Amino acid sequence: MTAFIRPSLILRMDLDERLFNDECVSDIKRSYSYVSPSLVQAHKPVDGQRPENVMRFMIKLHRAYWDKSDEAAQQLWEGVMPKWLHNMFSKVSNTIIAANNVRTENGQPAFPYHWLELEFGDNALIAVKTGSDSSFPADGVDMVERVRDLMNDGALGQDIACVRIPSRASYEAQLVAAEQAQAEAAAAAEQGETADQQDEQAVDAAAAAGTAAEAQTDSANAVEPTFAMPELPTFNVDYGTWGIEYVDGTVREFDAAVGTFA
């Protein structure tokens, strides 16, 4: 059996600066220390856009592995990458979920990662939308294999800066639809409330107000967070439409199901 060299990994977290502080950096480095070294940086929020946290896999392998026409490179990829990627996706996803469970137990909001980026050296950058719990999709390795095949075949063009799955336009459309569905469901539920339910809510509200007043007294000296992440609706992301982002700034929509540009 041939022994192959394995990749090394560095995790780089790029956070909305409104969430960035020393405690946050320390918590991230501690949580992921058993996975790989971690770098934490911040970016300014972009006007008109929702806050966005990105986790990047900086994948290091000092041998050729991306070019399918290179026999040694192809053997190295087949012998190492699919299994290694699967293990890393699983390990990091489990760590994200576990870290957020601890935050919930401590009365803190979950810390989301909106995109996971895969940096294969100078070969490719792939950005994949995370699930509602910030985990990597179960078929993540298949996505990477498909991108590699298409890039090697030249089907996505040249000078590609990033392959984004799904495209930003596709994801935003899905998010808007999910928000609308959530709003309609909430409105229908509100209209369907009976008078008795409203009375019960009034009683519950009064009790809650008393509890809140006590809690407010107990936490009078607590420091309020300066920024809270907006809550987004939970829905299953459709990864079918990719965004091929080129070095010159242009973006083309690619239908992954049929393998052609939209």
Image: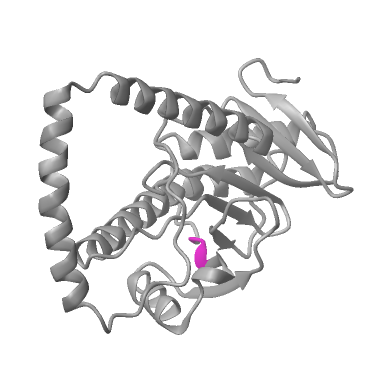
Q: Residue furthest right?
A: 248
Q: Nearer the viewer, residue 26 or 21?
A: 21
225 sits to left or right of 78: left
Residue at point 37%, 74% (across, down): 224
Look at the image and tell me in which quarter the C terminus lies: top right
Give above or below for 244 relative to 33. Answer: above
Q: Nearer the viewer, residue 205 or 139?
A: 205
Total tally of numbered discs in the picture: 0
**Residue 10 sits inside the magenta stretch:** yes
Classified by dominant secondary structure, the portion drawn in magenta counts as strand
111 sits to left or right of 141: left
Residue 148 visible to an observer of this rendering? no
Residue at point 42%, 47% (across, down): 231
Residue at point 58%, 71% (across, down): 17
The image quarter in which residue 241 lies:
top right
Q: Nearer the viewer, residue 90 or 222?
A: 222
Q: Nearer the viewer, residue 68 or 204?
A: 204
Give above or below for 16 relative to 248. Answer: below
249 sits to left or right of 89: right
The image quarter in which residue 95 lies:
bottom left
Query: x and y percent of residue 15 in the render?
Result: 55, 66
Residue at point 63%, 23% (across, down): 256
**Residue 49 sits inside the magenta stretch:** no
Question: Magenta span covers which residues?
Answer: 6-11
Query: x and y percent of residue 121 in the render?
Result: 67, 59
Residue 262 visible to an observer of this rendering? yes
Query: x and y percent of residue 119 in the render?
Result: 62, 56
Query: x and y percent of residue 10 in the render?
Result: 52, 69
The image quarter in which residue 151 lies:
top right
